[in-house]
Image (cartoon, grey):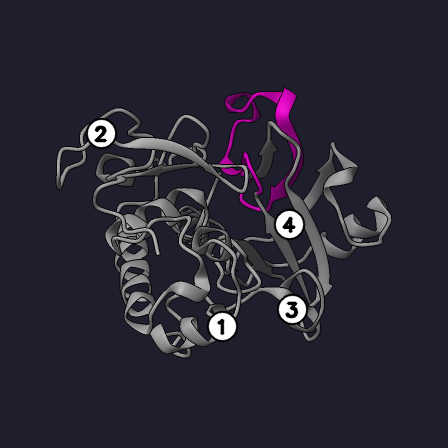
Amino acid sequence: MPELPEVETVVSILKKNVIGKIIKNISILYPNLIKTDILVDEFKNTLINKTILDITRIGKYIIFDLGDYVLISHLRMEGKWFYINDLSLVSEKHIEAIFSLDNGYYLIYDDTRKFGTFNLELKDEYKKINPIVKIGPEPFNEAVNGIYLFELMSKSNKYIKTILLDQTKISGIGNIYADEILFDAKIHPESKTNKLSLNAYNNIYESSKKILRRAIELGGSTISTYKAGHGISGKFQNELKVHLRKNEPCFVCKTNIIKIKVNGRGTYICSNCQILY
């Protein structure tokens, strides 16, 4: 599943290729992709002849700036964007939307699981309404620090991993990076948030920035459950310390990594290095 580093990588690749391009035609092959209350023909007519002015990211959402409107894309489990000049390069079976551009290329949204979403909203309003209005700040936000996390999370008795995955609290962290962050911070994922000290939250904050920055540098993680798309291959999976390393020795203490479930999510830990609070 794409997380903040993977989405950042997709945005970076798309920005290099489609900024300034004009949408000349649109084919919607899976209408349920569109979550805005709008007819498919109205969706298409609104976007045809629009120029892609910018592409940004809020949490795990990709924002296409189209002037008066924005197209908000969430990749969910398996969504991918392809920028290609030959439709045969992508399996037709999983194509959900095709945007024909004025340079002869296609911007294709492909999703094997069909969980991804499109929202078409007015640019002046989209940050005030769903789905964006509920998104919490990400670890790189200047307002976020250890004190912020402590004040936000310490009144709950939920597991710390569960809270880290709550995009309304802190955005951009998914299952892979929650495992890596908590290992780096030496905190067991089943630690209760009201048991953690300010120092523990400082460690989580610093580890979050460290892990996510490194993952962005390496283009995210390309693992068996998610590959980002045409021409995009992450390398951070080569630096994973615990995630997907069940029964392999911890790089720090040589104890075998174990896999547990935390609120239904597969979770990898070193039971020796990570302290349960």
Kindly report which numbered mark, 2 or 4, lies closer to the viewer in this rendering. 2
N-terminal label among 2 and 4: 4
N-terminal label among 1 and 2: 1
Q: Residue at x 33, y 36 (%)?
A: 243
Give x and y (percent) for residue 41. Answer: 84, 46
Mark 4 and mark 1 residues within 8 Å of each other at the beta carbon: no
Query: Which residue is denoted by mark 2 in the rendering?
Result: 256
Per the image, label 2 sits on a secondary structure element best described as: loop
Image mark for residue 133: 3
Q: Where is 145 relative to 41, above or below?
A: below
Kindly report which numbered mark, 2 or 3, lies closer to the viewer in this rendering. 2
N-terminal label among 2 and 3: 3
Q: Amino acid at mark 3?
A: Val
Q: Amino acid at mark 2?
A: Asn
The CA span between labels 4 and 1 is 42 Å
The CA span between labels 2 and 3 is 42 Å
- Between 113 and 44, the one lying in front of the other is 113
Residue 116: which quarter of the image? top right
Query: From the viewer's perspective, is 9 left or right of 211?
Result: right
- Between 162 and 40, the one lying in front of the other is 162
Give x and y (percent) for residue 252. Answer: 13, 41
N-terminal label among 1 and 3: 3
Query: Which residue is denoted by mark 4 in the rendering?
Result: 23
Neighbor class of circle 3 (other Cα within 10 Å; few <14, some 14-19, many 20+) is few
Per the image, label 1 sits on a secondary structure element best described as: helix
Kindly report which numbered mark, 1 or 3, lies closer to the viewer in this rendering. 1
